[in-house]
Amino acid sequence: MSRQIPPAAAWLGGAGLIPFAAAALCSMIADDSHLRAIALRAFVAYSAVILAFLGGVRWGAALGDADWRALIVSVVPSLIGFGCVLIAAEHALKVLALTYAVIGIFDVMRRPAPEWPAWFMKLRGRLTGAVVVIHGVLLFVLAGQG
């Protein structure tokens, strides 16, 4: 199984980082506090959506077995993401960053996942690393502003 990431997946995965970076940057540098707050909420909302997407990927992979454990694990990211849009953004950032890191570590530990192509794990590692770093930078900057 090839570890070469297909160009379409690489481009779309990379493009998926743009809303993270744009919202984080806006929430860090905007002059208007209202705009910063909106950008921060947008960041949390987008992060929750992408977390739910990762749960959907797990759901799809679990359909072959349809065992309870795999299906339950696949809905947890959506539930965490939903909870994060309901709490203060500063707390949501911490929960989201931790969740991305835990899911990323879990996925790496079960490598190679037979239901996923090898290139997917390579792409997931890169994208998850970037997402965790963006969350961390945003948390660091916001802590300095407060």
Image (tube, rainbow, N blue to C red):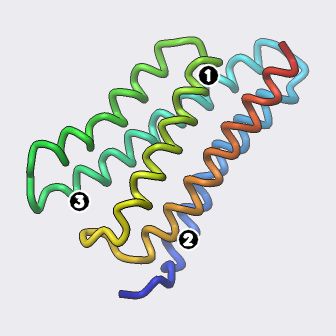
Q: Residues within 10 Å of mark 3 (few under 14, many from 20)?
A: some
Task: Choose top left, top right, bottom left or bottom right for residue 7.
Answer: bottom right
Please name the residue that numbered disc 3 is placed on. 61
Given contact means CB atoms under 8 Å apart, are the residues at marks 2 and 3 in contact? no
Compared across the picture, whether 57 is left or right of 4 comes to left
**How far apart are the two marked residues, 2 and 3, measured between alpha carbons?**
20 Å
Task: Choose top left, top right, bottom left or bottom right for residue 49.
Answer: top left
Q: Residue at x 59, y 27 (%)?
A: 94
Please name the residue that numbered disc 1 is placed on. 41
Image coordinates of residue 92 in percent, x first then y, are 56, 22
Q: Secondary structure at mark 2?
A: helix
Image coordinates of residue 32 in percent, x first then y, are 86, 16
The amino acid type of the residue labelled 1 equals Arg
Task: Choose top left, top right, bottom left or bottom right for residue 43.
Answer: top right
Instruction: Point out the image quarter for the C terminus.
Output: top right
Q: Is residue 101 above or below residue 144?
A: below
Q: Residues within 10 Å of mark 2 (few under 14, many from 20)?
A: some
The amino acid type of the residue labelled 3 equals Ala
Front residue of 105/86: it is 105
